[in-house]
């Protein structure tokens, strides 16, 4: 009967430990198509779009209401890769949404980038402050976090122009992140909204790109311990 050496037993044990540590990660329903590089909305659910609302995966989007240069075309491109999600605002005060449900471990992080592209009338400092958001829902559909939320009130004092009667802003790409408080299913929601009217004279968009999930820190630490153990076993065999 062939007997395994203590070293082989140690190595086999460490390999088994590593497999056990990684198994929850393998079972995890990871974010699909986070950078939209499929060129479409594979993996996502589009909510009911109302009014002029839209949701499309695009390489870039052009608007004509850059602050200080009304009528000049300004193009926003994907942050990374070739594609991004562009959600166009629709009916007044109704969020136009795109979502995806994922499973996260406790402490696991989902992160990405978003961009607010706003255009509307200026009739006062708080008029028509359209918005965009990134929202996280729990398995019951309740909001547990809003990693990114912005609207025209964040920009109007700088970018609204009473002389032209127009308002608008381009936020640039802004990073967001969410760490799960417990293991379970979460829904990532992207949205854009017109406020007070159905849009005009220009359209408001929310752009979204580069979403990823990263392992929970404790899981990485345990995996690291397994790798160190394998390294020590290999070193001891050489001595």
Image (spheres, grey):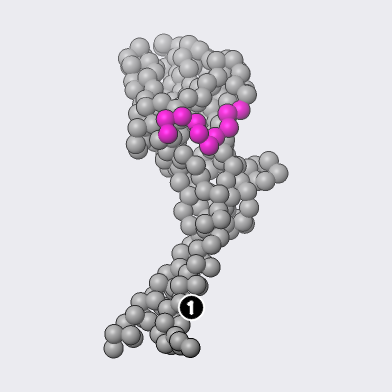
Q: Quadrant of residue 97?
A: top right
Compared to residue 113, the image places residue 184 above or below, namely below
* Residue at the image point whose x is 45% and y is 87% from the top: 2
Compared to residue 111, the image places residue 207 above or below, namely above
Q: Position of residue 48 (x, y in %)?
A: 62, 24
In this rendering, would 92 be left or right of 219?
Answer: right
Q: Position of residue 102 (x, y in %)?
A: 57, 46
Residue for badge 1:
13
Q: Position of residue 208 (x, y in %)?
A: 45, 34
Frontmost residue, 46 versus 168: 46
Frontmost residue, 112 versus 46: 46
Frontmost residue, 103 versus 171: 103
* Residue at the image point whose x is 29% and y is 85% from the top: 238
- Residue furthest to the right in view is 140
- Residue furthest to the left in view is 239
Frontmost residue, 208 versus 157: 208
Kindly state the secondary structure of the residue where label 1 is placed: helix
* Residue at the image point whose x is 48% and y is 57% from the top: 215
Position of the C terminus by quadrant? bottom left
Q: Which residues are magenta?
A: 38-47
Compared to residue 35, the image places residue 96 above or below, namely above
Whether residue 42 appears in magenta in the rendering, the answer is: yes
Majority secondary structure in the magenta region: loop
Total of numbered circles in the picture? 1
Q: Position of residue 56 (x, y in %)?
A: 48, 25
Q: Is residue 115 visible?
A: no
Q: Is residue 7 visible?
A: yes
Q: Residues within 10 Å of mark 1 (few under 14, many from 20)?
A: some
* Residue at the image point whose x is 32% and y is 14% from the top: 72
Whether residue 216 appears in magenta in the rendering, the answer is: no
């Amino acid at each position: 009967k062939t007997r395994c050496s203590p070293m082989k037993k140690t190595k086999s044990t460490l390999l088994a430990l590593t497999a056990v540590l990684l198994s929850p990660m393998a079972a995890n329903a990871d974010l699909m198509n986070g950078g939209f590089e499929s060129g479409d909305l594979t993996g996502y659910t589009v909510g009911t779009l109302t009014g002029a609302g839209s949701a499309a995966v695009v390489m870039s989007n052009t608007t004509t209401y850059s602050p200080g240069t009304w009528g000049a075309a300004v193009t926003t491109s994907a942050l990374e890769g070739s594609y991004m999600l562009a959600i166009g605002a629709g009916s007044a005060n109704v969020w136009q949404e795109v979502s995806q449900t994922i499973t996260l471990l406790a402490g696991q992080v989902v992160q990405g980038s978003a961009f607010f592209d706003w255009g509307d009338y200026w009739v006062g400092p708080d008029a028509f402050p359209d918005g965009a958001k990134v929202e996280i829902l729990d398995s019951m559909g309740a909001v547990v976090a809003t990693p990114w939320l912005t609207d025209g009130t964040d920009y109007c004092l700088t970018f609204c122009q009473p002389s032209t009667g127009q308002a608008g802003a381009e936020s640039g790409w802004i990073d967001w992140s969410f760490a799960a408080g417990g293991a379970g299913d979460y829904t990532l929601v992207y949205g854009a909204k017109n406020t007070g009217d159905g849009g005009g004279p220009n359209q408001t968009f929310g752009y979204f790109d580069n979403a990823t999930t990263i392992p929970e820190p404790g899981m990485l630490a345990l995996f690291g311990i397994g790798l160190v153990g394998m390294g020590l076993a290999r070193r001891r065999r050489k001595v």
